[in-house]
Amino acid sequence: MFSRMKEDIDTIFENDPAARGWFEVVFTYSGLHALWAHRVGHWFYKKRWFTIARIISQVSRFMTGIEIHPGAKIGRRFFIDHGMGVVIGETCEIGDDVLLYHGVTLGGTGKEKGKRHPTLGNNVVISAGAKVLGSFTVGENSRIGSNAVVLSEVPPNSTVVGIPGRIVKRDGVRVGRLEHNNLPDPVIEMFRQLQEQVDELKTKVTHLESERKNGGSESHDA
């Protein structure tokens, strides 16, 4: 147990340059507190003591601002950065070395029974405010951009941005680096192309009007 807790603390130092010391990490990192509380609640959940498990998760939610259902399965070296507003559903399955930022939701899309929340492969990063909704897999080594809404399967080694989420990088084919302040957005790109077409049409209309006026002037002079 203590070796696993040490691994959790080491994970924070590896992912957060603002972490200054183990005392600060242990006592001030809400993502760490939520993870440890989840492990306790998950133990009760597996023993089918569901009410106790939910009470633990709700107390953790009140204290940290992070809601992790005790039924969720979470792998090793999981890190929630900042964490406020993170929601992880009951049937979520999270692999190893996964990083979530604040405001992330791993949720369902309705009242369906059984597996209704996403599965995250190893080494997945989900940026601030992103929503991953439904029972599908986000492949390993994939990246979800800030505020993206992902509603369908994501292949491994992909970068997804936009609403709804669109793949903009896959298997090393670069479309743009995943930078939280400079993410490629296919919707914005579409509007940019439409604006270029509108500008081109305006130029043509202006040219035609000029020719018509010149033609009219010549006829009048004749």
Image: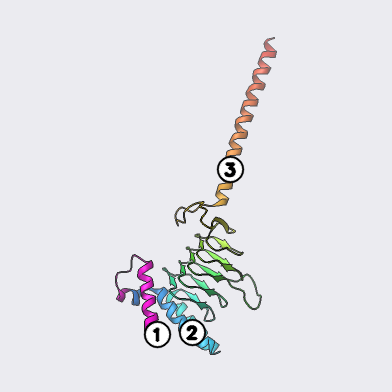
Residue positioned 70% across, 13% down in the render: 219
Q: Which residue is mark 3?
A: 193
Gap in Å between the C-alphas at discs 3 and 1? 55 Å
- Label 2: few (<14), some or many (≥20) within 10 Å? many
Q: Residue at x 65, y 20 (%)?
A: 213
Q: Residue furthest top?
A: 222
Q: Which label was assigned to residue 67?
A: none
What is the quadrant of residue 64 in the picture? bottom left
Depth check, mark 1 against mark 2: the one in front is 1
- Does label 2 or label 3 sit earlier along the sequence? 2
CB of mark 2 within 8 Å of CB of mark 3? no
- x, y percent for residue 157: 52, 61
Residue 8 at x, y = what percent?
Answer: 39, 76
Horizontal side of residue 111 vs 138, given as left or right: right
How are the colours assigned in the image? rainbow
What residue is shown at x 57% (from left), y 77% (from top)? Answer: 91
| Majority secondary structure in the magenta region | helix
Between 34 and 212, the residue placed more toward the observer is 34
Type of amino acid under label 3: Gln
Q: Which residue range is magenta in the image?
A: 2-24
Query: Mark 2 and mark 1 in contact (Cβ < 8 Å)?
Result: no
Taking 163 as reference, is 13 left or right? left
- Secondary structure type for disc 1: loop
Asked if the magenta segment contains residue 9, the reply would be yes
Q: Which residue is mark 1?
A: 1
Mark 1 residue crowding within 10 angstroms, few (<14) / some (14–19) / many (20+): few
At label 2, the amino acid type is: Gly
Marks 3 and 1, the one that precedes in the sequence: 1
Q: Is residue 100 left or right of residue 108?
A: left
Image quadrant in which the C terminus is located: top right
